[in-house]
Image: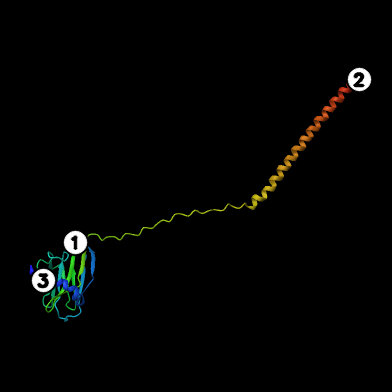
Amino acid sequence: MRARLWLLLAAQLAALHGSLALVQTPASLMVQTNQTVMLSCKINTSPSNTRIYWLRLRQALSASSHYEFLAYWESTRKTVHGKEVDKEKLTVLGNSPQNVLKLQSVKPADSGVYFCMIIGMPNLIFGTGTQLSVVDVLPTSPQPTQKTSPKKKVCRSPKPVTRERLSCAPLITGLLVAGVLILLVSLGVAIHLRCFTSDQRICFLVSRYKNIG
């Protein structure tokens, strides 16, 4: 129990000086299932022959959480794996000052915070850490909704009267006047004829009356 608390305390001290000594990239990563992941760790201050260890923290840092030793690279035996670590899945490439942890065919169970670590004098020095999230389907970013602006009402001016319509108006007026004149003349002729016929009848009756007398 004391050893676990001491290890957690060492991890907290990493925030003070580990970020300068060990720099990990990327800081966070989200990938789909069965992808290959490459995590990098670079030593800035320690000797170039320092051995780099890789650990994983599955849970948030607390009294109940614990680090899992994954592997380190050794020039004679290449990658040295921890217990219950899939050797075909996990590989450490290269040595200090640049070290890479390669994970193949990752699963959601591989999610967690991965730390590189070196054994300093007298403390353990941790890297900045890489948050790895493995999901079956990557989340899609929501697309911004486009606001539809209300349509503006367009006031249309009345259509101008064309010249063709204006040119037809005098012709129609002339035809109407001519029709009225013709009607008046016809009416006058009819009245005149009627009066002339009446006068002839009167004259005929007068002459006949004279003959009889």
- At mark 2, the secondary structure is helix
Residue labelled with disc 1: 108
Residue labelled with disc 2: 211
The residue type indicated by label 2 comes to Asn
Quarter assignment of residue 66 = bottom left
Q: Which residue lies furthest to the top in this view?
A: 213
Q: Observer-nearest residue: 58 or 194?
A: 58
Q: Can residue 177 be seen in this view?
A: yes
For image coordinates 21% across by 66% down, the residue present is 132
Q: Residues within 10 Å of mark 3 (few under 14, many from 20)?
A: few
Q: Choose mark 1 or mark 3, whichever is in front.
A: 3
Q: Residues within 10 Å of mark 1 (few under 14, many from 20)?
A: some
Q: Position of residue 71 (x, y in %)?
A: 13, 71
Q: Where is residue 119 in the image (x, y as percent from the top left)?
A: 12, 76
Does 185 sit above or below residue 39?
Answer: above
Q: Observer-nearest residue: 147 or 169?
A: 147
State the separation of the CA atoms marked 2 and 1.
145 Å
State the separation of the CA atoms marked 1 and 3.
29 Å
Q: Observer-nearest residue: 197 or 7?
A: 7
Q: Choose mark 2 or mark 1, whichever is in front.
A: 1
Residue 103 as seen in the image, left or right of residue 205? left
Q: Position of residue 165 (x, y in %)?
A: 64, 49
Quarter assignment of residue 185 = top right
For image coordinates 66% across by 50% down, the residue present is 166
The numbered dot on residue 154 is none
Q: Is residue 81 visible?
A: no
Does 16 sit above or below residue 206?
Answer: below
Residue labelled with disc 3: 6
State the separation of the CA atoms marked 3 and 2.
168 Å
